[in-house]
Image (cartoon, rainbow, N blue to C red):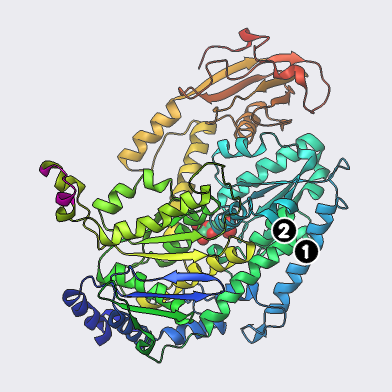
């Protein structure tokens, strides 16, 4: 297919459109096995012939060629002129994967070796913090792809027996949202002396990440002195000059490359560094190996034969269907993507539910949301031509059984939502209570096995009648069935299996994008909101600091902005020069009284830099340099603590370390709070 030809104009696409009219829902039973994984496609609204036609569509879309181009390091991300080589991040040391004629695998391993060495030093206590204490706690700052993948893997490993052992006495937290509440939550209970902050940003310009990084830099330097930053902050980025400019020692920066898309970066230092600090490199290496095993199968896929091979089919006696069981074939990874296209573009089902029957996989859906929706939510072809069909899926999900008690009502009797059911044979944390009918994991898995059938086969009015259901309830209790799902049964949830799962989704999503003929590796759709936010940021700054009126926005936004600015109360406090001023922030007190914002607001009033000792939940100390008027802005929303939002009082000058006496809940000097201006 020439790149300018739309896939919807091909005979293969039209044939499938016709096919959907003729054969809506015929279930054939077919599944495949690989490395202990069982993939069951039986409940898709597809027959063997459908699959055959889907593979013909893949040929028409030049799928194999596109996969090859990706693995061969061609610049398939054409709008950013980049290669797409996340597969190189988990390739074996001796692999040869080229970008612009240069094998990138040695560079990958150089960084992996550096991570191994650094994480071992931190974990063994040979790298210590500024006060000589071992760094046992990690806060990883990053957003989007610099957060969701690592969080998914961390959450999945957290209850895995080997990983638990390796992480004993350590904790890993993720700070993503620029909401100061997220800062508060992350530093609560953390001691800067024993904390290592990892700033993760491909660009090192993302507004949320950089403000959070500055906030935690302040948290560290105010507690331990500015020099402590070198010992307590490291970075992961492709932009090493900006890392250095930020104040992080370039020796403590871990590189990756522009050929790694943010949402595909969990296998780079983005994920490998924080995860190795928490679990040790050897556990993380297993995760990389799992992903690599899937890469190799995906790459070896050929589609020049009819799939599946009908000669392997045997008749199933109980249902009038074909029953096909074959060893795992690489084509099956491709088939996952093809069936998604089938559901979206031919059946018109816009969403997909990701339903892992494992609490350890609770962050799979949020991660796949980004991988899938940022990749495939596009309106034009890779050549920039507006598409006459919709691309992408609306991904959402929850672990079973929680989802069952939430949104399954809709997927059983309301809208048709193709579902991914993911189950695990062996629980990470088995429990079997004496006297119970089944183990806890069996109880969970009973639901895993039941739900796909409930969706596929439903319940007819006739069946309900046979059960003597009252006539008036029969419409309410009828289940239409014919609702597609796919089941993946993993042998266990080891680091290796988690890597496999990640790669399965990454490749499935790439296949969809290749068929739709879009660029799955850029993300221009996130830019407009970012630039509008920057305009708002400038306005807030100008209004708060120079009293400038709101201008340049539409009526609706102007009204909202004015209300937001008006509802911010101002407190004026007068104290004599030289005194130390302290106050305490309360949990929930998020709008306008974070450390960073406080400094921003106080500096112009006082004219001098203020000294920050700590941030939410701890007293904050300022040196009263001018004896001037101090204006404190703070929101008076109902979410605030009913107690005074800060304590003001003269306290002895003892420096800027944490002091218990300053954190008293009752303000010692309430008259210092003057009426609002
Ligand atoms: O949301 C847009 C985006 O560019 C994502 O693609 C990316 O994962 C995220 O922002 C974070 O970017 P960075 O790693 O550069 O901070």
In percent of the image, x 82 and y 26: which residue is there? 655
Circle number at residue 359? none
Assess disc 1: are there few (<14), some (14-19) or many (≥20) residues with their C-alpha within 10 Å of its C-alpha: many
Residue 513 figure quarter = bottom left
Percent position of residue 525, x then y: 41, 60
**Residue underneath mark 1:** 116
In percent of the image, x 14 and y 55: which residue is there? 462
Residue 179 or residue 22, whichever sits in front? 22
User: Visible in this render: residue 3?
Assistant: no
Residue 46 figure quarter = bottom left
Percent position of residue 132, x then y: 89, 43
Q: Is residue 75 above or below residue 240?
A: below
Residue 435 or residue 362, whichever sits in front? 435
Residue 497 or residue 671, whichever sits in front? 497
- Magenta range is 464-471
The reply to whether discs 2 and 1 touch (Cβ–Cβ < 8 Å) is: yes
Percent position of residue 72, x then y: 56, 85
In percent of the image, x 78 and y 47: which residue is there? 232
Percent position of residue 336, x then y: 41, 72
231 sits left or right of 436 in the view: right
What is the CA distance from the residue labelled 2 to the residue labelled 1?
7 Å
Q: Is residue 474 above or below residue 547?
A: below
Dot 1: element: helix
User: How many marks overall?
Assistant: 2
- Residue reaching furthest to the bottom: 304
Assess disc 2: are there few (<14), some (14-19) or many (≥20) residues with their C-alpha within 10 Å of its C-alpha: many
In percent of the image, x 40 and y 73: which residue is there? 337
Residue at disc 2, CB closer than 8 Å to ligand 1 = no
Q: Is residue 592 above or below residue 66?
A: above
**Residue underneath mark 2:** 276
């Amino acid at each position: 297919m020439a790149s300018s030809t739309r896939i919807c104009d091909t005979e293969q696409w039209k044939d499938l459109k016709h096919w959907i009219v003729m054969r809506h829902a015929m279930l054939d039973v077919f599944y495949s096995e690989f490395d202990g994984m069982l993939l069951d496609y039986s409940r898709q609204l597809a027959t063997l012939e459908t699959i055959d036609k889907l593979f013909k569509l893949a040929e028409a879309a030049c799928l194999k060629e596109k996969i090859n181009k990706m693995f061969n390091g061609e610049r398939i991300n054409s709008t950013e002129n980049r290669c797409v080589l996340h597969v190189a991040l988990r390739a074996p040391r001796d692999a040869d994967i080229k970008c612009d004629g240069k094998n990138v695998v040695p560079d990958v391993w150089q960084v992996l070796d550096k991570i191994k060495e650094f994480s071992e030093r931190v974990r063994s206590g040979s790298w210590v913090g500024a006060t000589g204490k071992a760094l046992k706690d990690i806060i990883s700052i990053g957003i989007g792809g610099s957060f969701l993948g690592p969080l998914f893997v961390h959450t999945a490993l957290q209850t895995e027996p080997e990983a638990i052992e390796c992480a004993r006495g350590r904790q890993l937290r993720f700070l993503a949202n620029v909401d100061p509440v997220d800062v508060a939550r992350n530093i609560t209970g953390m001691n800067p002396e024993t904390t290592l902050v990892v700033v993760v940003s491909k660009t090192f310009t993302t507004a949320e990440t950089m403000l959070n990084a500055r906030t935690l830099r302040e948290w560290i330097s105010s507690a331990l002195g500015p020099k402590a930053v070198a010992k307590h902050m490291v970075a992961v980025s492709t932009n090493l000059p900006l890392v250095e400019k930020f104040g992080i020692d370039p020796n403590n920066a871990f590189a990756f490359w522009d050929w790694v898309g943010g949402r595909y970066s969990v296998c780079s230092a983005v994920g490998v560094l924080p995860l190795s600090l928490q679990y040790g490199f050897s556990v993380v290496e297993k995760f990389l190996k799992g992903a690599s095993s899937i890469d190799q199968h995906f790459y070896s896929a050929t589609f020049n034969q009819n799939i599946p091979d009908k000669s392997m089919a045997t008749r199933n006696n109980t249902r009038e269907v074909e029953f096909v069981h074959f060893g795992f074939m690489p084509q099956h990874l491709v088939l996952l993507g093809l069936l998604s296209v089938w559901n979206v573009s031919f059946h018109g089902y816009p969403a997909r539910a990701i339903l892992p029957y494992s609490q350890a996989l609770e962050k799979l859906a949020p991660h796949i949301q980004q991988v899938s929706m940022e990749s495939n939510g596009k309106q034009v072809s890779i050549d920039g031509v507006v598409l006459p069909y919709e691309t992408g899926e609306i991904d959402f999900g929850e672990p079973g059984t929680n989802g069952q008690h939430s949104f399954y009502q809709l997927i059983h009797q309301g809208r048709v939502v193709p579902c991914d059911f993911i189950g695990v044979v062996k629980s990470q944390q088995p429990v079997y209570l004496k006297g119970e009918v089944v183990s806890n994991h069996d109880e969970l898995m009973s639901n895993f096995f039941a739900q796909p059938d409930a969706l596929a086969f439903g319940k007819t009015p006739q069946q309900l009648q046979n059960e003597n259901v009252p006539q008036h309830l029969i419409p309410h209790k009828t289940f239409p069935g014919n609702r597609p799902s796919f089941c993946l049964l993993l042998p266990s949830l080891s680091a290796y299996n988690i890597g496999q799962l990640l790669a399965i989704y990454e490749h499935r999503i790439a296949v969809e994008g290749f068929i739709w003929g879009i660029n799955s590796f850029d993300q221009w759709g996130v830019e407009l909101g970012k630039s509008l936010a920057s305009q708002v940021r400038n306005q807030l700054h100008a209004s708060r600091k120079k009293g400038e009126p709101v201008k340049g926005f539409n009526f609706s936004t102007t009204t909202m902005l004015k209300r937001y600015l008006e509802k911010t109360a101002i407190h004026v406090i007068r104290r004599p020069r030289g005194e130390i001023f302290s106050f305490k922030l309360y949990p929930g007190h998020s709008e306008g009284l974070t450390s960073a914002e406080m400094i921003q607001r106080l500096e112009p009033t006082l004219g001098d830099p203020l000294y920050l000792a700590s941030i939410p939940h701890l007293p904050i100390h300022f040196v009263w340099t001018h004896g001037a008027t101090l204006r404190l802005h703070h929101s008076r929303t109902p979410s605030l603590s009913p107690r005074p939002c800060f304590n003001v009082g003269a306290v002895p000058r003892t420096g800027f370390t944490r002091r218990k006496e300053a954190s008293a809940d009752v303000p010692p000097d309430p008259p210092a709070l003057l009426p609002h201006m």
